[in-house]
Amino acid sequence: MRASSDRVEQGEHPGLRAGAGEGRGALGARDAVHRAVRGLEGAAPALVLTFAGGALAADDVAEQAARAAGDVRLVGMTGAASIGAGGPADDGCVAVALDAGAAVGTGVVQRASSDLRSAARTATADALAGLGGRRAALLMLFVDTASGDQGDVVAGAYDVSGPHVPLVGGGAGGDDPAQLAGGRALRDAVVAVALATPSPAGVGIAHGCRPRPGPSIVTRVEGTVIHRLDGSPAEQVYLARLGLAGTRIDDATFERLAAVHPLGQLELRGDVRLRHVLGRTPDGGLRCATRVPPNAPIQFAEQTAATIVASARTAAAEAVEQLGARPRAALVFDCGGRRHALGGAGAALNAEVGALAGAFGPQPPPLAGLYTRGEIGRVRGARGDRNHAVVVAALA
């Protein structure tokens, strides 16, 4: 799929109009899209963004959503659960429709795993070209974590977009991970969506992790598996730094422990890139969601339900502050690991979404999001592949 555009002359619209919709169950995608478009109150839609929970079949979601959208361009992604004003739902679908106050460009590259960075460059170039010369306020990237390291996606997009365009998005999740574009559910693809809006976008990025004492050095790594920390088996060092030296735990317990104790890769200027620990290997290695380079210094981090909820509020408030205006729409890319740490359902998960929505004030804007497998969020610097983070984009 090559570049395409919906062109609107600068100043023709005083602001963006947006409508949101939600649906549950077998017809959730259809209902969500219909409601989102109706929310525009007669304005012509330029784009519909659709995010579906992991209990729904991606191919069915794509077909339903495309039929409901008709000729309107529709893109989106699946996640562990959808996020809307009504809260999270693993069998739900949410949608946001944007009117022609936004110029839209899209790019899709399939078979991305053959060269993920190149695929991201091409998709981004196509999306930006579709803006017809207008400056992008935001670039969204929807990717397949099975295609490779999300760091390569961010690097490829940055090669084209440069330092002035904020990046948001993440990896598809759920039982049937897929990106949605062209009326189909795609796998092994990079989907890029560029928006030019009347006002710059606001992007907030936060996490709920706090470092534990005592850094370590990655002394042997292969792919996404850290085999040695400080010259010793990585799992042994990891458990010792969490106060569990010599403790034998089963895989299920280890997974629960890892959900609230990611690694923090230390970088220049004091930045920390959180790296999710997916599990362990038979030889005592740590299998991570993304690659950590050899000789990298790392911290051992921890998070609680309270810090996760607080960070959601922080990310939304930061997005609003950057926007400097009342948001007309908001997009959320939240970590599936955070959802797991909050128990996957129930009061804690609702509290996180409530804190996020509450940061927008008594009347939150149309909102749509999902729980991803790795998040993309970049405002400054060349990096933006994240774990255990929540990324919020606010549009005016």
Image: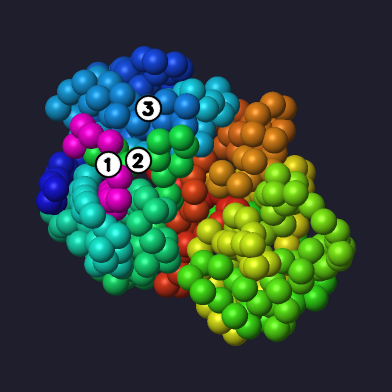
Which disc, if any, is residue 57?
Answer: 3
Which disc, if any, is residue 266?
Answer: none
Q: Which residues are magenta?
A: 182-196
> Amino acid under label 3?
Ala
Residue tagged 1: 186
Whole-percent x, y for residue 275 in the image: 59, 62
Residue tagged 2: 178
Residue drawn at x 76%, y 71% is 237
Residue drawn at x 60%, y 28% is 362
Frontmost residue, 371 versus 350: 371
Q: How is the image coloured?
A: rainbow
Q: Main secondary structure of the magenta part?
A: strand
Label 1 crowd (10 A; few <14 / some 14-19 / many >=20): many
Q: CA distance from mark 2 to mark 1?
A: 5 Å
> Amino acid under label 1?
Leu
Q: Identify the element where label 1 is drawn.
A: strand
Q: Identify the element where label 3 is drawn.
A: loop
Question: Left or right: where does residue 264 sit relative to residue 172?
Answer: right
Q: Quadrant of the C terminus?
A: top left
